[in-house]
Amino acid sequence: MRTPPTPLNAELTVCQPNSCTVISEMSAMRERLAAMARTQDGLLESVRSLMAEMAANQEKLGVCSAQIPAVQSLTQELAQQLKALQESTSAAVPRVAFTAVLGHSLGPLPINMPVKYPLIITNMGNAYNPATGSFTARVSGMYYFSYTMYNGRPTPNSVVGLMKNGQMIVTTWDTAGGDQNDSATNAAVLQLEAGDSVYTQLFAKRTIYDDNGRYNTFSGFLLFPL
């Protein structure tokens, strides 16, 4: 017959550890350590990749920095060329523009007569002659002209035309009605050769009214040379 455990044997039985549990915990710990090692390896690999990428970017940055002076020099050269081109283009294209004002009444006259606008507001290029009232083209090109006539009489009797080399281009009329203080404007784009003449003409037996109000004007400018 087996002898029952003494109190000492019972105490030893309670304090003895479970070897299976210890082994299981040690195995789980080894797995966790292995997982941590794998994670650490992955982090190290990421760090190496980032360091390699940074080194490559620094190398590219060094190349770009080396190219900056060359790019700046090229930019300055292109800016100088553009400025020279603008100056040469500006010098090659003539600047022609004028506006002149009558400032006094005219007519009636027995014959058709060019209108001489003596008061010059603008005459860039000096192509308009106030002594004759005529604009003479200095260069061949497309030109824009406009004029305004004014009738301040109780009985309207105004007819003015825009003329090119003696040929009528457009006209304005105010010869009917019982009102007064009427104005009319007309305009045209004309192709001119060097030496062509453009002016306005007051028709025979017609009148236009003007005073310090400066109602009658004649203007023109070069659109572009041909």
Image: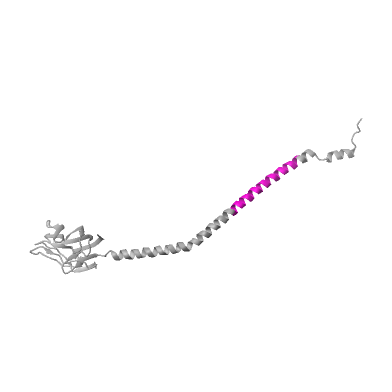
User: Is 208 a magenta residue?
Assistant: no
Q: Give the percent coordinates (x, y) of residue 58.
A: 55, 58
Q: Please provide percent x and percent y for residue 111.
A: 8, 63
- Prevailing secondary structure class for the magenta stretch in the rendered image: helix
Residues drawn in magenta? 24-51
Residue 67: tell me if it is visible. Answer: yes
Residue 60 lies, with reference to residue 105, above or below; the image says above
Q: Nearer the viewer, residue 52 or 185?
A: 52
- Quadrant where the C terminus lies? bottom left
Farthest residue, direction left:
110
Q: In this picture, is 46 found above or below 66?
A: above
Residue drawn at the location 74% of the way across and 41% of the way down: 27
Q: Quadrant of residue 79?
A: bottom left
Measured as percent of width and height from the top left, residue 198 is found at: 17, 62
Identify the residue shown where x is 59% and y is 54%. 52
Q: Is residue 50 magenta?
A: yes
In the image, is 172 to the left or to the right of 63?
left
Is residue 48 found left or right of 150 in the rendered image? Answer: right
Quadrant the N terminus occupies? top right
